[in-house]
Image (cartoon, rainbow, N blue to C red):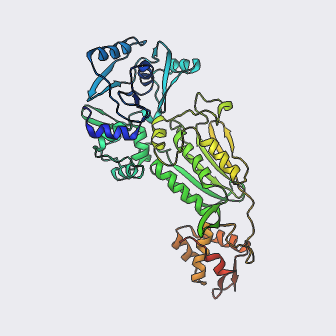
Amino acid sequence: MRMDKQELEFILQEGEGFKIEFKERLSNVDKEIVAFANASGGRVFLGVNDESEVIGIKITNKLKSEVQSIARNCDPSIEIKLERYEEILIVEVKEGKDKPYRCKEGFYMRQGANSQKMSRDEIVEMIVGVGKIRFDELINKDFEFPKDFDEERFRLFLKENNLSTDLDTKDILINLGLAIRKDKKLLINNAGTLLFGKKPQKFFLHAYLDCVLFKGKEKSEIIDRKTFRSDLLDQLLSTKDFIKRHLNLRYEFKDFEREDKYEIPLRAIEEALVNALMHRDYFFKGANISLFIFDDRVEIVSPGGLPKGLDKEDFGKLSVRRNQIVADIFSKTPYVEQTGSGIKRMRLLMKKAKLLPPKFKFTSFFKVTFKRPATPQATPQATPQDGLTELEIKILDIISKNKKVSRKNISEMINIKEDTVKEYLKKLKEKEVLRRVGETSAGYWEVIGGKKVIGKNKS
């Protein structure tokens, strides 16, 4: 399919990425061709600068011949296709079938939106693993488009991240690296399945996120549990809601504006979750990502440990993407501020909150641990909302409106188990913000300092 105005506008808006490179001139184009051949293929747009501005290039038979000659002189030679669109020459490079490829400057590999020179160990690893491809790049032969594709979710993603276009869905998916066209049929890869499939777990049973709230400091008694079997972006949002329900919350007022302050910065935990979803080893079957909340800590555990090519000494300094396409899509969202800066940002956020830095452990799993601060005891005289979770505040709000409300009623109103309600009522009594008057069915609940607590609840 030939380039048209709509597709070009979308590509320029999207910018450089794992499969797109802009170059003003012909210099060093051999590095880009080799890097794409060693990765998953891609396109070089000659006549476009790094700011996504079309400056144009004089397209002659001589220029085309030079580009073909550069590709043939790579070792082994690389097959390319040339396409002209106005003053832009598009060089399409297919994924090589005889990796690794090199140019006169050496071996290069596509890393995010850049072409990086490969180290000796990376070259050896590629030679040993010829034919082996990243999980997210594999075509999902069982995925039926459009039957298994969530069009509504995909369009919402485009809208929320300002990727507006009139292009056909199929063309957008191809440009984002989520699909290929073969024999007039659209084939979705594993990244497309995980991100925009209606039911990703239909194809990958292990690609879910399990959230558990434990009583105490050990995995002995479960208070609340939610398992999210949905696309990766929804898993992130749903897990954030679970965390907000169970972490202690206080409010600060600045210039008459209320700011929610959680005991652990939500942005730090979000960074860890995004890291887990982007970089877990999806080849690792029989294991899933887990979030555990204990009385003294929050843990996020994902299968796979450190990706190959990243040593413990370089952890937090260098970035290696295990799932290039998944990471590329996440990088277009507000959840990824800057590629490769997540670990550093977690540490800075915890330091700013005057908390201990997160701990990282690498085995065949990757674990991040956030230490929870000591929970203050709320009293009517002190600010009673301090040390309460969002869920506890909701329960107090319900009780303040109906002092004879039952555990069952509370359970139904906020969609949690009755045993979980029982545990939270016990916690509220221990925090001295709630008491029971009378032990029989004629008894009732009394919120201590009622309006002081409820008056600052979330609406």
x then y, percent, for residue 29: 41, 20
Q: Name the side, left or right, on which 336 lies relative to 249.
A: left
Identify the residue shown where x is 58% and y is 47%: 271
x then y, percent, for residue 404: 60, 84
x then y, percent, for residue 194: 44, 44
Identify the residue shown where x is 44% and y is 49%: 231
Q: Name the side, left or right, on which 423 lies relative to 382.
A: left
Count of numbered tags: 0
Identify the residue shown where x is 61% and y is 84%: 403
Check the image and report above or below for 65 versus 306.
above
Q: Name the side, left or right, on which 229 lies relative to 353.
A: left
Check the image and report above or below for 126 versus 424.
above
Q: Is residue 229 visible?
A: no
Identify the residue shown where x is 30% and y is 44%: 169
- Residue 54 found in image quarter: top left
Q: Is residue 454 visible?
A: yes
Q: Name the side, left or right, on which 233 lies relative to 398.
A: left
What is the quadrant of the N terminus in the image? top left
Check the image and report above or below for 5 versus 33.
below
x then y, percent, for residue 21: 41, 29
Residue nearest the viewer, comparing 343 with 137: 343
